[in-house]
Image (cartoon, rainbow, N blue to C red):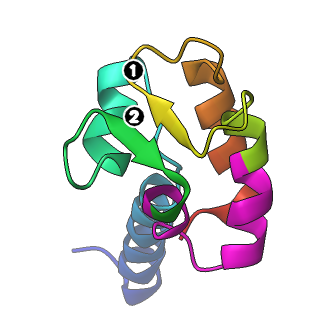
Amino acid sequence: MLPKASVILVALTFLIALGGCASKKQKYATTDDVFAVYDVNKDGKITQDEFVAHFKDKQKAATAWKKIDTDNNGFVERTLQGDAPVNIWNAVEDTSIAD
């Protein structure tokens, strides 16, 4: 039987490992991944409102939106032509604005 201290250490290690997994931000591999999360009404466009709704800090999210909607038309279409590619979506979420 393991001593109490060992059991506690194992339990703490397990909890820390779980916490590390849970805190990792989502990574998008494809445009479909991005749209599955942000295109709430499934119309093929992501609006600033749909984007900002996913974040606690609305001001930071609105600022991040400017990095995504690079053609400044107020939405991002599925083709992402003229808008930020998938790697920018990942970088924006990594800048600590995600919930």
Residue at disc 2, secondary structure: helix
Identify which amino acid the numbered label 1 is placed on: Thr
Q: Position of residue 26 (x, y in %)?
A: 46, 43
Q: Is residue 60 above or below residue 46?
A: below
Identify which amino acid the numbered label 2 is placed on: Val
Question: In the visual, does 26 lie left or right of 1?
Answer: right
User: Magenta span: helix, strand or loop, mainly?
Assistant: helix
Which residue was labeled with disc 2? 34
CA neighbours of label 1 inside 10 A, class few (<14), some (14 to 19), many (20+): some
Q: Is residue 54 magenta?
A: yes
- Return the residue nearer the eye: 83 or 88: 83
Q: Is residue 94 visible?
A: no
Q: Position of residue 28 (x, y in %)?
A: 44, 28
Which residue was labeled with disc 1? 31
Name the residue: 37% across, 74% down.
11
- Return the residue nearer the eye: 45 or 28: 45
Question: In the visual, does 38 lie left or right of 58?
Answer: left
Q: Are marks 1 and 2 in contact (CB under 8 Å)?
A: yes
Q: Quadrant of the N terminus?
A: bottom left
Instruction: State the count of labels.
Output: 2
Marks 1/2: CA distance? 5 Å
Q: Position of residue 70 (x, y in %)?
A: 74, 30
Residue extending farthest bottom = 4
- Return the residue nearer the eye: 37 or 70: 70
User: Which residues are the magenta region?
Assistant: 50-65
- Return the residue nearer the eye: 36 or 39: 39
Tell me the number on the disc at residue 97: none
Q: Is residue 7 above or below residue 54?
A: below
Residue at disc 1, secondary structure: helix
Q: Position of residue 18 (x, y in %)?
A: 39, 62
Question: In the visual, does 73 lie left or right of 23?
Answer: right
Name the residue: 47% across, 84% down.
5
